[in-house]
Structure formats: C-alpha cells, structure tokens
Image (cartoon, helix red, strand yellow):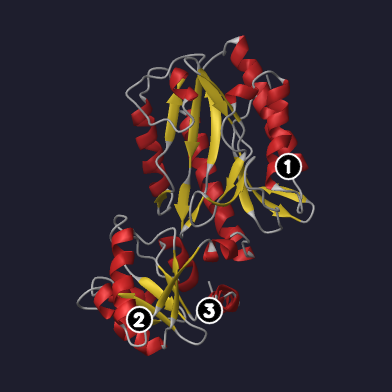
C-alpha cells in the first residue's frame, strides 16, 4: 500500500480527537496497529505486546523493544520508531514529555487491567498529571469501510481459500478423520502462499455439525451425513471466511429440506441487502425464511459479521445493536440450521457492499440443487 493510504487513515483518526477530548491516542490492538502503521508483527499472547502506537495531531510514534526494532523500521509508514529498554510502562513519562500529553485516550476494550493500573500510576505521578480516557471502537469505525486496495486483497484471499476448499471437497471420502481434513486445509492454505489460516478450520460431520463452532475431532466422516467446512485464509494481513456443507452420497430427505431452506435464506439475503439498510433488517430477511419453514428455533447466531484484518470485526449483521450498512463494508452472509444430535447446515459467502447491492467475493462452487 502506498504512503497516502496510511496518511489518510491517520487523518481520519485525528479528526476524532476533539470530539473525544484527547490530545494523544494510545493504540495497542494488533490489527488496529497494523492498519494505521503497517507494522506486521503479531502479539504472542494477550499479556505480551510487540509494540504500540502513540499518536497526536502532529506526531506518530511506534514504541517497541529490541526484538522488533529492525522489523518496525522496515514496516512502518509515517511513524518514528522508539525502542524502549526497560519496558513500556517505564518509558511512559518520556513519551508524555515528548508528546506534551495531558489527555491520553486508550483502547478500553484491549488494555488489560494490570497494565492499565501501572499506566495510571505513572500518569498520576507525572508533572503535570496525565488523564487516561477510555475510548471504544475508534479505529474499528474507520476499518469498517474498506478502500479499493483492501477489497482487492480480501477478494484475493477469498479466491485462494475457495480454490483450496474446492480441492479438499473433491478429495473427501468416507472414513476420513475430521482432524486430518482440518490439518490438510491448513497445509494447503500455506502451500498456496497465504500467511496461514485466519482461524482454525471447522470440520464438523454428522452430529458434530450441530455445534456452530465445533472443534475437529477423531470422528470419521460418513456417507450421506452433512459435513460443515468453515474455513478462512489470511493473505497479506487480510482474512477470508467461507462455509460449505457437503454430503458424500445421497443425504436423507430431512437434510435435503434443511439445505434447501438455508440456501433459499442465503440467496434472498444476498439479493436484498443494500446500502442504507440496517444490519438487523438484513438479518431478518434470512431469519424469516428459516422461521417460516419451521426452523426458527435452530438458527441462533447472527446472519453475518464484518471481515477484514480480523476474521470477525464490525459490523455485526445480526438482530442486536443495529448499524447502517454502507458502501465499502465487507461482511459475511451465513445462515444456518442446527439440529441437536443430528447435525447442521451452514452456507457462508463474503460480500462487499456496493451501490447496487452485494457483490460476492467468495467462489460460487460446491452448492447443491436438491
């Protein structure tokens, strides 16, 4: 991505400072950090950080340690790299002085309590004292609208994943183990040049398919039963997510009917979503189809979710907390029906919302016409 893209993102962030009442923003969430700076390093676990950003109206610092200094200098655009030697908390007073910070906005949903308490102590002891102000969904609001270069990357990730999944499905045979299939998916994703899977593959056969987020087991797949394959790849930092439900041989009549209902719900939602529609309205389009077919109690999750640098991000396309759908949003449409003890059917596509509706980014393969 060229430098102007990162400059525009920082400009959008800075335009929010006055409304929030802050003079500095502290960014710690990994995808937000990469989105704003280009820094690709990952965090090993929740209580470890490869670096963070401090942004004012006229300065931008990426603060890291010696393990990541060289990578940061190679990756970042528009940020000065600062290496701390004694730990982030100990360098905070220096950062405050350097940026003339008086009101520090931090990502309230991501700063762990222990780090917050230590930062608050440093801030209160500083002269003049620094006020810590929790902010929520600050960068996430910007990330909801994808630029053309992001849509292109998401499309490439989706196409890669579609090709891998089509191959895996073509090679399925009764008796294969769920865990082995999941491992094969991950290996093929990397062989095709992706960074890796965007989340652990879901391979759920027979009764395991009644668990929307089932973990692959030692169970062997069988003829006729539904097999849910929910998979995604990450390519240059951008995720894909798609689901197909497949059958080896002739499925029982009840699952043919369930599949028909889910596919009808999905197609109607794909054809109907428009800019200006609220997310709960989009959700109800598919949910009403499933409810009217008598399966309303067996569709418990939202119709879809945003996707970008994270596999799940805003907007949530569900019945709660409605948001307005806008051009440039990329999200999934994935209705499902789950019958406890028997199995389930889920079908998922990634779409980008354009002026005249949804354009599907995932490959239109491996569907049935029962």
Q: Nearer the viewer, residue 145 or 4?
A: 145
Labels 1 and 2: the sequence-earlier one? 2
Is disc 1 placed on a helix, strand or loop? Answer: helix
Estimate how packed mark 1 is, as few (under 14), some (14 to 19) or many (20 or more) residues with alpha carbons within 10 Å: some
* Label 3 sits on residue: 3
Give the left or right position of residue 55, taking residue 365 as reference: left
Measured Cα–Cα span from mark 3 to mark 2 = 16 Å
Q: Residue at x 75, y 53 (%)?
A: 275
Residue 80 in sight in this render: yes
Q: Element at badge 3? A: helix
> Nearer the observer, disc 1 or disc 2?
1
Residue visible at 45% across and 52% down in the picture: 234
Asked which quadrant contains residue 151, the reply is bottom right
Residue 340 in the image: above or below residue 350:
above
Q: Quadrant of the C terminus?
A: top right
Give SS at disc 2.
strand
């Amino acid at each position: 991505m060229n430098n102007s893209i990162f400059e525009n993102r920082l400009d959008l962030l800075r335009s929010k400072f006055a409304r929030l009442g802050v003079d500095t923003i502290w960014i710690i969430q990994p995808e937000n950090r990469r989105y704003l700076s280009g820094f690709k390093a990952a965090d090993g676990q929740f209580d470890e950080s490869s670096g963070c950003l401090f942004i004012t109206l006229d300065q931008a610092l990426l603060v890291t340690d010696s393990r990541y200094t060289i990578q940061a200098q190679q990756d970042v655009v528009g940020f000065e790299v600062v290496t701390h030697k004694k730990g982030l908390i100990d360098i905070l007073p220096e950062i405050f002085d350097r940026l003339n910070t008086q009101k520090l906005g931090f990502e309230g949903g991501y700063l762990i309590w222990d780090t917050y308490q230590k930062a608050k102590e440093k801030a209160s002891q500083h002269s003049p004292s620094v006020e810590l102000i929790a902010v929520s969904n600050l960068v996430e609001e910007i990330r909801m609208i994808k630029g053309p270069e992001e849509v292109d990357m998401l499309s490439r990730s989706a196409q890669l994943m579609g090709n891998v999944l089509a191959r895996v499905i073509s090679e399925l045979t009764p008796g294969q183990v769920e865990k082995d299939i999941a491992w094969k998916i991950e290996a093929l994703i990397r062989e095709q040049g992706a960074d890796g899977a965007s989340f652990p593959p879901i391979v759920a056969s027979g009764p395991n398919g009644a668990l929307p987020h089932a973990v692959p087991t030692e169970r062997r797949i069988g003829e006729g039963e539904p097999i849910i394959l929910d998979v995604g790849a990450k390519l240059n930092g951008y995720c894909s997510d798609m689901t197909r439900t497949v059958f080896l041989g002739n499925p029982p009549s009840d699952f043919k009917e369930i599949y028909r209902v889910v596919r009808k719900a999905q197609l109607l939602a794909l054809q109907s979503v428009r800019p200006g529609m609220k997310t709960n309205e989009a959700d109800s389009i598919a949910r009403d189809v499933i409810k009217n077919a008598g399966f309303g109690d067996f569709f418990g999750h939202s119709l879809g979710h945003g996707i970008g640098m994270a596999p799940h991000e805003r907007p949530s396309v569900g019945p709660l907390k409605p948001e307005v759908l806008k051009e440039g949003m990329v999200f999934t449409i994935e209705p499902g029906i789950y019958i406890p003890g028997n199995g389930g059917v889920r079908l998922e596509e990634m779409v980008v919302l354009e002026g005249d509706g949804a354009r599907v980014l995932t490959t239109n393969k491996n569907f049935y016409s029962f």
